[in-house]
């Protein structure tokens, strides 16, 4: 399997978690009342769920390197799967926690 670059799995997990948290932070900048009504514990659980979903999506991104390196429709499918995986992980984790 050809890799696009040599980032190991732990790096991809960290990148996924960081990107998910950054996207959530940007969302909160534009809607600071989005988490109104959550206790500190619930907020911490929410951000933990976002980070976990991002890390799992990073693992999915790592797993689909071979498809992306082939190009064409396989590359498109790998990108679509990664985005759908992030959404599915986030919804599942938040549903379980809340």
Image: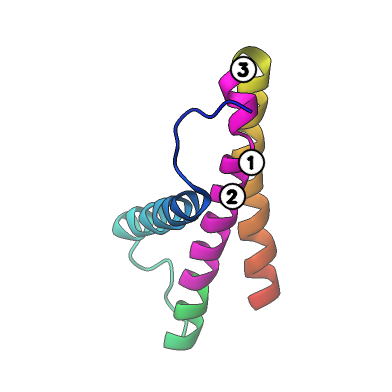
| The stretch drawn in magenta includes residue 51 | yes
Residue tagged 3 = 70
Q: Nearer the viewer, residue 37 or 91?
A: 91
Residue 15 in sight from this viewpoint: yes
Counting residues from the start of the chain, the first of labels 3 and 2 encountered is: 2
| Rendered location of residue 15, percent (x, y) | 42, 51
Counting residues from the start of the chain, the first of labels 3 and 1 encountered is: 1
Residue 98 in sight from this viewpoint: no
> As displayed, is residue 62 above or below residue 22?
above
- Magenta range: 47-70
Q: Residues within 10 Å of mark 2 (few under 14, many from 20)?
A: many
Residue tagged 2 = 59
Do the numbered discs 3 and 2 sit on residues whose CB atoms are within 8 Å? Answer: no
Q: Residues within 10 Å of mark 1 (few under 14, many from 20)?
A: some
Q: Residue at x 55, y 68 (%)?
A: 49
Q: Residue furthest top?
A: 72
> As displayed, is residue 24 above or below residue 66?
below
Mark linked to residue 32: none
Q: Residues within 10 Å of mark 3 (few under 14, many from 20)?
A: some
| Rendered location of residue 1, percent (x, y) | 64, 28
Q: Residue at x 41, y 51 (%)?
A: 19
| Picture quadrant of residue 24 | bottom left
- Location of the C terminus by quadrant is bottom right
């Amino acid at each position: 399997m050809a890799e696009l670059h040599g980032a190991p799995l732990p790096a991809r997990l960290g990148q996924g978690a960081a990107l998910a948290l950054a996207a959530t932070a940007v969302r909160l900048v534009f809607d600071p009342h989005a988490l109104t009504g959550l206790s500190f514990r619930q907020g911490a659980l929410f951000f933990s769920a976002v980070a976990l979903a991002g890390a799992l999506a990073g693992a999915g991104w790592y797993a689909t390197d071979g498809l992306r390196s082939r190009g064409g429709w396989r590359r498109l499918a790998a990108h679509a799967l990664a985005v759908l995986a992030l959404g599915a992980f986030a919804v599942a984790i938040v549903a379980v926690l809340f």
